Image: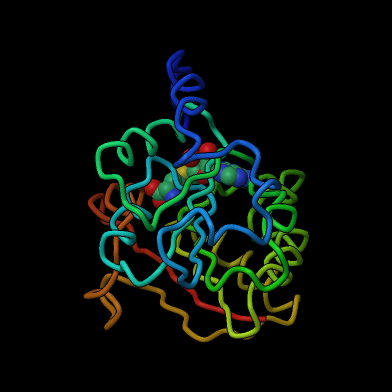
Amino acid sequence: MRLRNKPWARPLIEANPQFITTDPKKYRSEWQKRFKKIAPLFVEIGTGKGQFIIEMAQKHPERNFIGIELQTSVAAVVLKKQLELKLDNLQLICANGSGVSEYFEDGEVAVIYLNFSDPWPKKKQAKRRLTYPTFLEQYKNVLEKKGHLEFKTDNRGLFEYSLKSMNNFGMIFDKISLNLHQSDEAEDNVMTEYEEKFSQRGQVIYKLEAHF
Ligand code: SAM
């Protein structure tokens, strides 16, 4: 997702430190203090405009959510929605997910969501894929022992790559769906923006859940 540079984005982020941070290392092991209640932490890396994380936070007040988005202009769009909703179980980070183990203490996170992550199809770009081993290593550290990872995509190449990468890393698959919207998980599924767009075009959605 690419958005045109929004001159208001950075000032809006700086004016609202109660909902968003660009310095997540500061809250390592202390994230629960940023929420009204202590609750298991569910983290999405690459929120886009935030449709998924916002709907999940509304649907699950018994969980705390953190959305991480790299692009300032995109993170500011999520922040705008949060400023209207003021969900007390949603916090935002504008930073690169590649630093996730610097942002969270070992075992601080219950679930990590990766939704429609950029596929980086060229071989030389593989290191940027959010399911590349260097990312998996970090997820392993920050996830609690019973924690897990959920990954959805329409991109068959990225899905196959991720299955191999996770399998080679020794991860255990709990669920694999080759057509999420036709499966028994469909009823509870919260759609992302990309998911809506691609499924309307008739594309199949893949999903996996796995743990270390
Ligand atoms: N998850 C959303 C959805 O399904 O509609 C957005 C998908 S979009 C293809 C991927 C998003 O991930 C973009 O907004 C991009 O800026 C963000 N992103 C990519 N790499 C990232 C990284 N390393 N850390 C944080 N966000 C990242």
Left or right, 54 with reference to 27: left
Residue drawn where x is 23% and y is 51% of the image: 200
| Residue that sits furthest to the top in the current view | 7
Quadrant where the image shows the C terminus: bottom right
- Taking 8 as reference, is 146 above or below it? below
Callout count: 0
Q: Quadrant of residue 78?
A: top left
Q: Is residue 120 visible?
A: no
Q: Is residue 139 visible?
A: yes
Residue drawn where x is 54% and y is 32% of the image: 71
- Provide residue 164's location: percent of width, then percent of height: 67, 72
Left or right, 168 with reference to 191: right
- Taking 47 as reference, is 1 above or below it? above
Residue drawn where x is 70% and y is 69% of the image: 165
- Provide residue 148's location: percent of width, then percent of height: 56, 77
Q: Residue 3 or 74: which is nearer the viewer? A: 74
- Provide residue 61's location: percent of width, then percent of height: 31, 67
- Provide residue 13's location: percent of width, then percent of height: 48, 28
Color style of the picture: rainbow
Q: Residue 94 or 205: which is nearer the viewer? A: 94
